[in-house]
Image (cartoon, coloured by chain):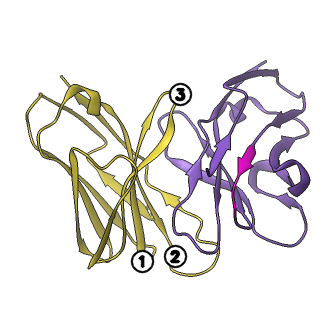
Chain colours: A purple, B yellow
Amino acid sequence: AQSVTQPDIHITVSEGASLELRCNYSYGATPYLFWYVQSPGQGLQLLLKYFSGDTLVQGIKGFEAEFKRSQSSFNLRKPSVHWSDAAEYFCAVGSHNTDKLIFGTGTRLQVFP
Amino acid sequence: DADVTQTPRNRITKTGKRIMLECSQTKGHDRMYWYRQDPGLGLRLIYYSFDVKDINKGEISDGYSVSRQAQAKFSLSLESAIPNQTALYFCATAPRTGVREQYFGPGTRLTVT
């Protein structure tokens, strides 16, 4: 079955620390992969996407993600977290032959000063 | 102005009432989607539409109906609201071609008492 797993429900980091949010997927076709961020009271904003080419993709707000086919993973990283990064982060997967995305259950990031 | 708008942003209604949530977009996208978000469950697809004449059920369509009045408008109705439909509802759009990343509205928080 197609699925997306975000193993960490809640992560807490100190401001200035590095961050890695995990995402694993199970998908039969070549995946398109996405990371979205949801700030409190807001809709989901696209951070970055991968569909082909370089497996390390850069996104907005200083985020990057690396696609590792052998591990079925698409982890999100940021070298230095800011307090404004506190939000919920969703990983999603789709493909060229579907019009639907499958979302993970999200990881809530808390940032301490 | 926002590309994807949703009205109302917040709504409290009583069990058994009919309620409509509206979504409008200025992105010119063909695809439109309705999701509900519940804590710990991520986003679940209710309905989606590829154009005015093409409506499809998602994974949790029971108790909901939709109307695609125009390319830019997609409404979600709860015919007889029940308390377990209390949730955050999102509308999203996507282009017909390409990677088809989805763009989200700000959400409607619905409470059914």
Q: Please give the range of residues in magenta.
A: A24-28
Mark 2 → mark 3, Cα distance in angstroms: 28 Å
Res B63 quadrant in image: top left
Residue A26's place in the image compared with A96, above or below, is above
Side (left or right) of B65 relative to A31: left
- Residue hosting label 2: B95
Q: Secondary structure at mark 1?
A: loop
At x 47%, y 35%, the residue is A41
Foreground of the two, B17 or A72: A72
A74 horizontally vs B75: left or right: right
Mark count: 3
Please report contact status of discs 2 and 1: CB closer than 8 Å, yes or no: yes
- The residue under the point 45% across, 76% down is B29
Kind of residue at disc 2: Pro
Q: Is residue B21 left or right of residue A96?
A: left
Q: CA distance from mark 1 to mark 3?
A: 30 Å
Residue wearing tag 3 = B40
The answer to which of marks 2 and 3 sits earlier in the sequence is 3
Residue bearing the label numbered 1: B30
Q: Tell which tag, 2 or 3, sits nearer the viewer.
A: 3
Discs 1, 3 touching: Cβ within 8 Å = no
Q: Which residue is farthest front? A: A1
Q: Residue at x 28, y 64 (%)?
A: B74
Chain letter for mark 3, please. B
* Callouts 1 and 3 in the same chain: yes
Image disc number at residue A97: none
Going from N to C along the chain, the mark reached first, 1 or 3, is: 1
Q: Position of residue A7 (x, y in %)?
A: 72, 30
Q: Residue A83: image x %, image y %?
A: 73, 29
Quarter of the image with the C terminus of chain A is top right
Which chain letter matches label 1?
Answer: B
